Amino acid sequence: MTARLDAPIAAKFADLALAHLTREYPNKLTHALAGPEDVQGPRALHPIFYGSYDWHSCVHGYWLVLHLLARFPDLPQAARIVATVDEHFTPHNVAGECAYLNLPHNRGFERPYGWAWLLALSAQLEALDERSVPQAAAWKRDFAPLTEIFVERFSEFLPKATYPLRVGTHFNMAFALALTLDFARQTSRASLEALVVDTAKRWYLNDAGCQAWEPAGDEFLSPSLMEAELMRRVLPGDAFVGWFTRFLPDLAASEPATLFTPVTVTDRSDGKIAHLDGLNLSRAWCQRSLARALPAGDPRIALLDDAANRHLDSALAHVAGDYMGEHWLASFATLALEA
């Protein structure tokens, strides 16, 4: 059976996210110190994004609850979501986050994963229906300074980034560009859209015969499938199908076999090994999305859909259970279930 996001699953994911968005500890800070004055706790450093174990997970935790609220306005957790966002997305708290980011030694903070998720969150804010969520107008206005910081940082960074990072962890550039391109299109930022498209073509357009040397032991993104998912956004239909065939020429024969085999997770209390549940979910997201981009009758569609279902089956039961996965996996499960 093909699993899809429905109201009961959305309610479960909303409960999970609300339980960790404002949970300050345990916390894994990525924090540079310029002096003793920088020795502070998570909430003092990040007045909005202090929960969820780390900054970027808190960012996409807020994306998740707002996305679920938009999809299911009658969600039982709707009032709690609105109250939590309203408490945190204030001008004072946004100014605190901006002050941290604007310190000279923090210009590279959370590049590129956190940058991209912040823009995805901003796009989700912009998409909220102010008739059903009246508070959304103030949230959008007050959040804007954070959005502008990361638009500016991508605009500054991408032209000087000669090479992409092709790993399957937070530094993967294809994932960051995919979310950023979605943001640019949803918010009508033509110059950022053009920069992302040009950068993706510069980095990936000539790739062919991908060997898919994956997975590594701590990956939550497939470097090969994530690159293809970005290029699906970048290239028009026929051009993408041609690129995809050159990139993975043996896909119709279920090769590389590793892309069709769900990965094994041996210890979900180990934060790095627990990443592999996310790999199964993000692969399913890409496999489903890529299948939809192929022409009707293409034999690769059934193969990709079958692989996506098997990857989902291996991971969905583990979205909750241990905090090492629980603080972030529901976001990727949502991407997969909606693809």
Image (cartoon, rainbow, N blue to C red):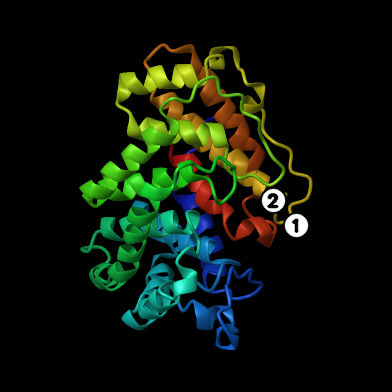
Q: What residue occupies the far bottom of the structure in this picture?
A: 37
Q: Amino acid at mark 2?
A: Ala
SS state under label 2: loop
SS state under label 1: loop
Place residue 25 in its image quadrant.
Answer: bottom right
Q: Position of residue 141 (x, y in %)?
A: 24, 71
Name the residue tied to disc 1. Answer: 269
Q: Amino acid at mark 1?
A: Ser
Residue 307 shown left or right of residue 202 in the figure: right
- Name the residue: 52% across, 47% down: 332
Q: Position of residue 212 (x, y in %)?
A: 61, 28
In the drawing, what numbered circle is on residue 278? Answer: none
Q: Within 10 angstroms of label 2, few (less than 14), some, or many (20 or more) residues?
A: many
The image quadrant where one finds the C terminus is top left
Q: Position of residue 218 (x, y in %)?
A: 68, 47
Determine the CA span between mark 1 and mark 2. 7 Å
Name the residue tied to disc 2. Answer: 274
Residue 202 shown left or right of residue 105 in the figure: left
The image quadrant where one finds the N terminus is top right
Q: In the rendered structure, are the residues bearing label 1 and label 2 in contact, judged by CB atoms less than 8 Å apart?
A: yes
Q: Nearer the viewer, residue 17 or 47?
A: 47
